[in-house]
Amino acid sequence: MAAEKESTELSGGQDCILEPLCFPEELNARVNISTSDDCPVCCVLCSHTAPLTDKDQFLKHLLLEHKLVIADIKLIADFPKYMLYWKKRFTEQPITDFCSVIKTNSEGPAELQEFYFLLCDVLPEDRILREELQQKRLEEVLEQQQNERDDTSFQRSCMFCNEEFTGNRAVLLNHMAREHSFSIGLPDNIVYCTQFLDTLERKLDSMQCLYCEKVFRDKTTLKDHMRKKQHRRINASNHDYDRFYVINYLELGKTWEEVQSEDDRELMEDEDDDWSDWQALPVCAVCLFCNRQEETMDRIYTHMQEAHQFDLHKSKTDLNLKFYQQVKLVNYIRRELHQCRCYGCQRKFSTKEEVVRHLEEASHVMQLPDSTHWDQPQYYFPTYENDALLTALSDSEGECEGAEQSCDVPVFAEDISDLKALKQSSVLNKLLRNGGSSN
């Protein structure tokens, strides 16, 4: 068979899995993005303009030149449009009709007193404007996200293996999560995906770690660092990435951590402590031989028996496997199939599907190799980090033996103490009596 390759090597550099594997998940800052950073911001009281990137200097101009302070700027979704609106309104009515007036040094001489103007959402007109801008921003983001979902012209290479992907962005994101254990979140939670990937690629091209942002001398050193330190992920505390997640647009000025913590507080303050409608996310176990997932272990065991003629319980009984031996066996089978090799005869194939077909045709499914092949310390470590099948393994027979042994051990009931006698003869009472007699 052309697809088959004879291989009797059980170890060696080519068999090493140099990065953690994960099964694909099947469930589950301050945002100012849609306005270009180059968009100029106009002063509401003069002809001065400044780029949006120079916002601090612009606010300094408002304060020093016009004594104007704008409250909660981080909550303004579109600052240039906000300023244009008030520039027009200030030409129609005096500024004192809209702003709170604050007098400084009120007890000092008149020449040293100054008047500052505060523009904030206490004014109903300002609050409505902020809400409208926020709503428009959210609509723009959701529209952009929908366009990205529907777009089939996407074309990009994986930043880790250079494999080319076309069609939907989710294909590339799922590939990086599945094959490279690099997940930036569920595709449906991400917006401006192309800009996000461009940002990450620029960092990798600059030999910069995506998590700690430390710079390295070459790509090999960078890859080793990210693998060993488990830095093949982005830092959730880095707010530069907040603009790429839809959750950060729900409430302007609040990061996803603040939104989530706010929800927690509401639950804690809720007088109704009924948790009956709460449901935990199901933990899905994945079949050893295919991508079938089941929420209960009984179902996955049944599936493996019926679809692949593999009985894990029978193997456990026949080989008298303890818990950690079961762990090693499962990890060994996972590893062999990941490397497209039959664990029964060590024959190598091109794809995992060919291995599974060979196992069934050659009746090698239950033909487990000698324990010297898989009962090794390296198989204590999971082949797939999120392998839920490992959590379902049990050492029930060992527990039964322990229970039977415990039945032969005689148990003697403890005598019930006479508490009154203990109280009368206690050391404390003697001391108290001795102390009273001495007095």
Image (spheres, rainbow, N blue to C red):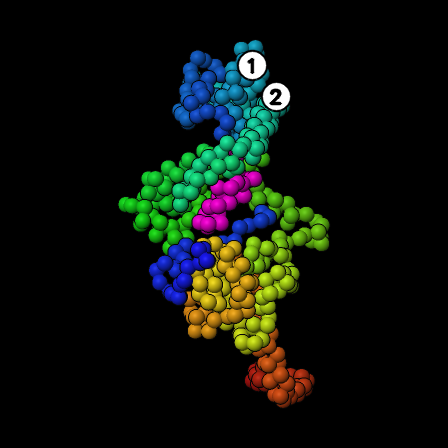
Which mark identifies residue 402? none
154 over 316 or under it: above or below:
above
Q: Which residues are magenta?
A: 170-192
Q: Is residue 191 magenta?
A: yes
What amino acid is found at the position of numbered circle 2 in the picture? Glu
Q: Which residue is mark 1?
A: 89
Q: Are marks 2 and 1 in contact (CB under 8 Å)?
A: yes
Judge whether residue 346 can be spotted in this image. Answer: yes
Q: Is residue 174 magenta?
A: yes
Q: Residue at x 40, y 63 (%)?
A: 7
Observer-nearest residue: 90 or 256?
Answer: 256
Percent x, y for residue 428? 58, 82
Question: Label 2's element?
Answer: helix
Percent x, y for residue 161? 40, 45
Q: Quadrant of residue 282?
A: bottom right
Observer-nearest residue: 243 or 225?
Answer: 225
319 over 330 or under it: above or below:
below
389 over 177 or under it: above or below:
below
Percent x, y for residue 13? 34, 60
